[in-house]
Amino acid sequence: MENPGQAGAAGDAQRDRAQEPQVLREQRSGIVTLTLNRGARFNPLSVAMIEALQAEFTQLATDTSARVVVLAGQGTAFCAGHDLREMRACPDEAYYRSLFALCSKMMLAMQALPQPVIARVHGMATAAGCQLVASCDLAVASTQARFAVSGVKLGLFCSTPSVALSRNVLPKHALEMLLTGEFIDASTALQYGLVNRVVPADELDAAIDTLAASICAKPATAIRMGKQLFYRQAAMGTAAAYQLAAQAMACNMMDADALEGVQAFIDKRPPNFGT
C-alpha cells in the first residue's frame, strides 16, 4: 500500500513540475547561466529541482559550445537546501536514502562537467545550498551572502553537505560550522576558502563576467583536461598523483593549442589558439 505521505509529496512534485521551469538557462559568448527558479521559496533542492539540475548537467557534458557554467538563484536567497516540507511528508528511510543518493549524484555530475562551474552567491546558502556552493569549482559572493550548514539546529547533522564542505575548508572550520549550525558572513567564507572572491552586490555580475571571460580565453582542451586531473589527483597519494599528472601533462602537451602556446612564448608573440 502506498504511504500517504509519499503520495502527497509525489502530488506536490507533479504540481511543481507543471509550473514554470525549475531551472532557467541562458547562454551567451560560451557562458551558460543556470538559475534556480523557485525564489519565493528560497530555491529549495526538491526532487524536481535536483532532477532539473541533473538534466542540465547531462546536456552540458557534451555541449562543446559551453565553456563556463554559472550557477545562480532567483529571489533573495541562493539556495536554502533540501525541501524540508517534501522530506517531512515522506517519513520513510528508503525514500530518504533515494533522495540523498539522487542529490549526491547531481553534485558529482556537476563536478564531472568539462566546464568550470562558478557559483553566483548573492544571498543565503544553507545546508545542501552551502553544499552546492562547495561543490562548484569556483564561487563569487556578494557582501550580502551568508552561509551555514544548519541542520544540526533541527536535530539533523548535515552529513552529505559535510563531504563537500570538508573538501573546501579546514577541518576545524568545517566542524565548527557543522556542530553549531551558525551562519558565517561572506568575508569569513572567503577567509575559510569556501568562496574565491567577495564583492559588493552591485558588482557581482561584473566580477563573474570577468572571471568567466578569463577562463573562456584559455584553450578548451587545457581547461577540460586540467579540471578532470585536478579532482582525480586530489583523491590520490602524492606519488600516484604525480604519475597521473605527468601523464595528463604529456597528453596536453601534444594538443595543437599547447604546441602553439609554447611556440608563441619562444617567438615572443601572442598565441593564436584555435579553440
Image (cartoon, rainbow, N blue to C red):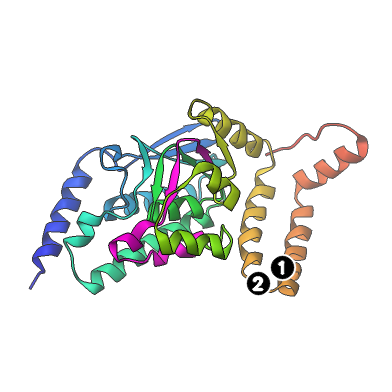
Query: The disc labelled 2 sits on which kind of residue?
Result: Met
Tag 1 near tag 2, CB within 8 Å: yes
User: Is residue 261 visible to the viewer in this orientation of the structure?
Assistant: yes
Q: Name the residue beneath numbered marker 1.
A: 244
User: Is residue 164 visible to the viewer in this orientation of the structure?
Assistant: no
Marks 1 and 2, the one that precedes in the sequence? 2
Residue 116, image x, y percentages = 57, 47
Query: The disc labelled 1 sits on which kind of residue?
Result: Leu
Residue 212, above or below 130 = above
Quadrant occupied by the N terminus:
bottom left
Quadrant occupied by the C terminus:
top right
Would you call the spot at circle 2 few (<14 residues within 10 Å), some (14-19), or many (20 or more)? few
Q: How many marks?
A: 2
Residue 137, image x, y percentages = 56, 50
Does dot 2 land on a helix, a strand or a loop? loop
Query: Spatial distance from mark 1 to mark 2, Cα to Cα?
Result: 9 Å
Q: Name the residue beneath numbered marker 2.
A: 236
Does dot 1 land on a helix, a strand or a loop? helix
Residue 69 among those drawn in magenta: no
